[in-house]
Image: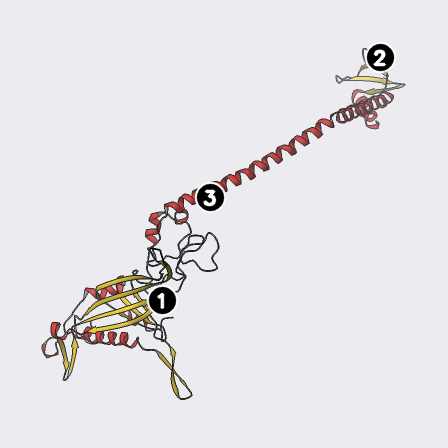
């Protein structure tokens, strides 16, 4: 993990240690656009010392950046065979990097010299004391980061089938590089050359016996130590973790770039079609099962039809019997006789003088209202 000074080391200010001055100590305002370019856009180089966790950044012009991949083979000569039999050993990745560090001010020249000093220190290990003797505790492994061109891809995997999850434009828009020095590529610096360009570019005289180079050249050779598998597995994935399951992605070695693979996309289409067909077969099977259940239900209803018809007839007979019984009970309670015209137990005997009729029931004469009440009382008794 990077130390707290990582942010400080990654920022640039040409006036950090001294503001530019004219003669007689008169200060002037100076602005260097390269500071903003490095601080905001992070177009910088960085080195990370693994044993100490310290880092150093450079605002520089890259003059050389070359990668070489060397495959090593054992050649077995066989008698009578024109060509030897080659047995693969390994592939080694080496990098050469060169950059120029200019100084716009005396302050920046001083800081550049200090940053180069840190880089030189990163070539040495860390020691520990064991019974009074200094013993190497950690070798001087270094991480180098050249923006997105030189970075670790350990833990970075592209989708197994890129086109299945992202469009080509989405892949392009998502392509980014972490700016932290700790995300650099792990390896060893085999050779470091620092050229102060004193005869060519001159120096800044700071004080008696003290000079600051105006331009420093740095050249180094670097051998890479990869932190993930280097090769293809049975699923045609490159650098996938050992515990990866089918369908997981490949490592984005070496630049973190993910591209659509037409062959893989075609395979995805075939697999997706097969999955859809399997799902459709499952749906068809479920529909057939429902249809069988419905047919069995209909057959059961048809088999019960005679019983239902008999039940309906029985129910109708019971209803008819109840109705006949009700009518018989009503007839036993209803007064039989003649009213006005027709025969009833109450004969009309005249009018009550208010437009209503009077009826004679036995020896009694009642009004129309009393007669109606008597009839209702008889119905309620039923």
Q: Secondary structure at mark 3?
A: helix
Residue 132 placement (x, y as % from top left) = 40, 89
Question: What residue sits right under mark 1 in the picture?
Answer: 225
Q: Would you call the spot at circle 3 few (<14 residues within 10 Å), some (14-19), or many (20 or more)? A: few
| Disc 1/disc 3 C-alpha distance (Å) | 37 Å
Asked where in the image residue 209 lies, by quadrant, the reply is bottom left
Instruction: Report the quarter where the C terminus lies.
Output: top right
Residue 26 placement (x, y as % from top left) = 12, 76
Q: Secondary structure at mark 2?
A: loop
Question: What residue sits right under mark 2 in the picture?
Answer: 343
Q: Secondary structure at mark 1?
A: loop
Q: Is residue 350 left or right of 280 when viewed as pictured?
A: right
Residue at horizontal 46%, vertical 52%? Answer: 247
Which residue lies most toward the front here?
Answer: 80
Viewer-proximal residue among 66 and 318: 66
Viewer-proximal residue among 144 and 308: 144
| Disc 2/disc 3 C-alpha distance (Å) | 97 Å
* Label at residue 271: 3
Q: Is residue 261 visible?
A: yes
């Amino acid at each position: 993990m990077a130390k707290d000074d990582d942010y400080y080391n990654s920022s640039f200010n040409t006036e950090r240690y001294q503001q530019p001055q004219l003669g007689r100590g008169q200060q002037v305002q100076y602005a260097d656009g390269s500071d903003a370019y490095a601080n905001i856009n992070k177009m910088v180089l960085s080195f990370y010392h693994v044993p100490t966790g310290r880092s150093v950044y450079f605002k520089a012009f890259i003059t050389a950046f070359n990668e070489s991949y060397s495959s090593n083979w054992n050649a077995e000569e066989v008698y009578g065979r024109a060509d030897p039999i080659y047995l693969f050993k390994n592939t080694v990745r080496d990098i050469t990097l060169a950059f120029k560090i200019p100084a716009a001010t005396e302050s920046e020249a001083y800081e550049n010299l200090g940053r180069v000093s840190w880089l030189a220190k990163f070539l040495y290990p860390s020691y520990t004391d064991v019974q009074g003797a200094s013993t190497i505790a950690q070798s001087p492994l270094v991480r180098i980061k050249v923006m997105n061109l030189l970075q670790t891809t350990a833990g970075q995997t592209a989708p197994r089938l890129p086109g299945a999850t992202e469009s080509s434009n989405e892949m392009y828009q998502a392509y980014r590089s972490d700016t932290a020095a700790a995300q650099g590529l792990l390896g060893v610096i085999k050779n470091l050359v620092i050229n102060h360009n004193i005869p060519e570019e001159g120096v800044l005289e700071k004080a008696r016996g003290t000079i600051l180079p105006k331009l420093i050249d740095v050249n180094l050779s670097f051998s890479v130590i990869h932190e993930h598998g280097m090769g293809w597995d049975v699923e045609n994935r490159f650098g996938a973790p050992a515990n990866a399951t089918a369908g997981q992605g490949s490592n984005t070695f070496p630049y973190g770039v993910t591209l659509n693979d037409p062959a893989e996309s075609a395979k995805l289409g075939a697999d997706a079609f097969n999955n859809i067909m399997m799902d459709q077969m499952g749906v068809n099977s479920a529909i057939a099962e429902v249809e069988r259940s419905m047919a069995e239900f209909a057959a059961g209803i048809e088999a019960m039809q005679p019983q239902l018809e008999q039940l309906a007839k029985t129910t109708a007979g019971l209803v008819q019997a109840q109705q006949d019984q009700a009518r018989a009970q009503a007839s036993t309670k209803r007064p039989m006789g003649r009213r006005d015209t027709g025969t009833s137990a109450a004969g009309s005997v005249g009018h009550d003088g208010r437009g209503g009729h009077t009826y004679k029931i036995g020896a009694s004469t009642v009004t129309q209202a009393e007669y109606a009440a008597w009839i209702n009382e008889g119905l309620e008794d039923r």
